[in-house]
Image (spheres, coloured by chain):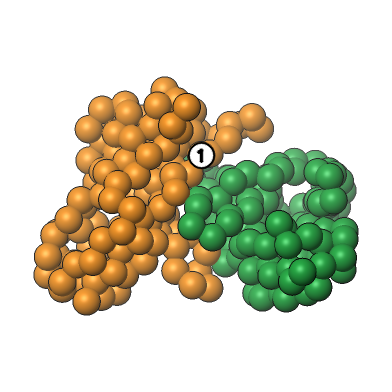
Amino acid sequence: TQLLEQSPQFLSIQEGENLTVYCNSSSVFSSLQWYRQEPGEGPVLLVTVVTGGEVKKLKRLTFQFGDARKDSSLHITAAQPGDTGLYLCADPNGSGNTGKLIFGQGTTLQVKP
Amino acid sequence: NAGVTQTPKFQVLKTGQSMTLQCAQDMNHNSMYWYRQDPGMGLRLIYYSASEGTTDKGEVPNGYNVSRLNKREFSLRLESAAPSQTSVYFCASNLSGWNSGNTIYFGEGSWLTVV
């Protein structure tokens, strides 16, 4: 089973600041997903990256997949309080073709007004 | 559109008691999953059902049993609850297997405390 390491574990910033969170593995990802989980709710898929070097943007969020497909980053520009939540990366191929997602431990982000 | 619905939302159990968490999806998905979420651990897969009539163990199956009652419903049972099973439980579903367009949908979670 592939292990996903996320960093940092916790991040508390002021509104308007930029931030980057990371997801790393010792193995190569076939693809990688990023989820956001708000308090009291289940995770919601933000993006899937598939190709090494791929960059995807979702409003103020920029997702990058490493060239070697062993790491990924999520960059948030001008963070808003509404960005507060738990950000999880996941490997949908962690255990074969079953959609059996393997998750990292998550980065908890707090954006203060 | 309800999506994935879990019940109960909150439950307190005494050590040794049993209970069943219910999950239903209305998206005609083939695959369903039970995860638990603990602080600093992300989500860990307990059991999954790739299709109606099949179930398989995930990363942390000990102390749990599951039943895929029909295509819509997938229940998780704790036969003799232990404090280590205090957690937030999430049910999820997706169409089947994995491909680039196959999104997994999560329920809102069930908060279980075992005292």
- A74 versus B6 height, above or below: below
- B21 versus B16 height, above or below: above
Colour in which chain A is drawn: green
Quarter where residue A74 is shown:
bottom right
Q: Position of residue B43 (x, y in %)?
A: 48, 59
The residue closer to the viewer here, B18 or A23, is B18
Which residue is labeled 1 in the image?
A: B105
Q: Which residue does the image show at 44% across and 69% down from the upper left? A: B38
Residue flagged by tag 1: what amino acid is it? Answer: Tyr
Q: Is residue A50 left or right of residue A64?
A: left
Q: Position of residue B29 (x, y in %)?
A: 43, 27
Q: Is residue B34 left or right of residue A11?
A: left
Q: Position of residue B50 (x, y in %)?
A: 39, 35
> Label 1 marks which chain's residue?
B
Q: Is residue B27 left or right of residue A39?
A: left
Colour in which chain B is drawn: orange
